[in-house]
Image: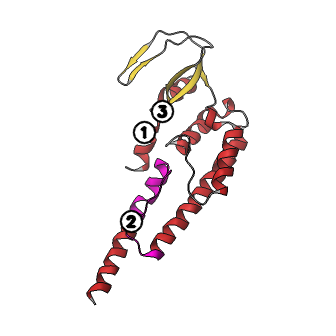
């Protein structure tokens, strides 16, 4: 899976919006959405929320995991632990970027949250680099890593696959001598 596929999959995640129009229930392949009533929050797939927001037909409701307090707590936990901390959603970084690009004005403290999410991303990426370095130095052919997001897995998949293949080839060459 590449980053575009992860982006596509993330757009099926549900998000709460507050519509400013009235419309009956809409039947989609993955289920029904609605009815849409003015000022009554409901959950819709991210792709629909983007379309409605860009059409000025709704406002986003800030997800609980994207509040300033929640993001500060996530960052604090990530910085205090040596291992990866569980994220509230497997697409948390893509969803955050999408929400901030489309509906920044709907997110209280949006600019501050964006910076904290960047710090969280940087912290996790540093751990990932360190883990890969430790794996390469140990000569192990496998590793168990938990709590990575889909984007992080995409970033390291090819590099890790190639690195482990080269390590295995080097170990085979040493054994043959």
Is residue 43 shown in magenta?
no
Query: What is the distance, in whole Å, between disc 1 and disc 3 at their CAs?
Result: 10 Å
Dot 2: element: loop
Verify CB contact (< 8 Å) between mark 1 and mark 2. no
Q: For the point 55% across and 47% down, which residue is it?
A: 86
Q: Residue furthest bottom?
A: 177
Q: Residue furthest left?
A: 176
Stretch in magenta: 137-161
**Neighbours of disc 2 within 10 Å: few (<14), some (14-19), many (20+):** few
Residue highlighted by disc 3: 13
Is residue 141 shown in magenta?
yes
Do we see residue 172 in this rendering? yes
Quick check: 50 above or below 110? above
Q: Quadrant of the C terminus?
A: bottom left
Indicate the quadrant where residue 142 lies: bottom left
Pick whichever of labels 1 and 3 is earlier in the sequence. Answer: 1
Indicate the quadrant where residue 136 lies: bottom left
Pick whichever of labels 1 and 2 is earlier in the sequence. Answer: 1
**Neighbours of disc 1 within 10 Å: few (<14), some (14-19), many (20+):** few
Q: For the point 58% across and 40% down, which residue is it?
A: 96
What scheme was used to colour the molecule?
secondary structure
Pick whichever of labels 2 and 3 is earlier in the sequence. Answer: 3
Query: What is the distance, in whole Å, between disc 1 and disc 2 at their CAs?
Result: 29 Å
x and y percent of residue 62 in the render? 64, 30
Dot 1: element: helix
x and y percent of residue 140 in the render? 40, 72
Which disc number belongs to residue 41?
Answer: none
Residue highlighted by disc 1: 8
């Amino acid at each position: 899976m590449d980053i575009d596929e992860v982006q596509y999959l993330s757009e099926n995640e549900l998000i709460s919006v507050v519509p400013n129009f009235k419309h009956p229930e809409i039947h989609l392949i993955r289920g029904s959405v609605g009815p849409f009533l003015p000022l009554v929050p409901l959950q819709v797939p991210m792709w629909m929320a983007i379309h409605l927001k860009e059409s000025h037909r709704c406002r986003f409701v800030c997800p609980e995991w994207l509040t300033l307090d929640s993001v500060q707590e996530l960052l604090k936990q990530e910085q205090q632990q040596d291992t990866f901390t569980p994220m509230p959603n497997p697409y948390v970084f893509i969803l955050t970027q999408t929400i901030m690009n489309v509906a920044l004005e709907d997110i209280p403290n949006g600019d501050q949250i964006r910076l904290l999410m960047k710090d969280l991303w940087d912290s996790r990426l540093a751990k990932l680099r360190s883990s890969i370095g430790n794996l390469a130095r140990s000569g192990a052919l496998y590793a168990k890593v938990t709590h990575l997001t889909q984007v992080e897995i995409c970033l390291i998949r090819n590099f890790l696959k190639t690195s482990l293949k080269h390590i295995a080839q080097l170990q085979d060459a040493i054994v043959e001598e």
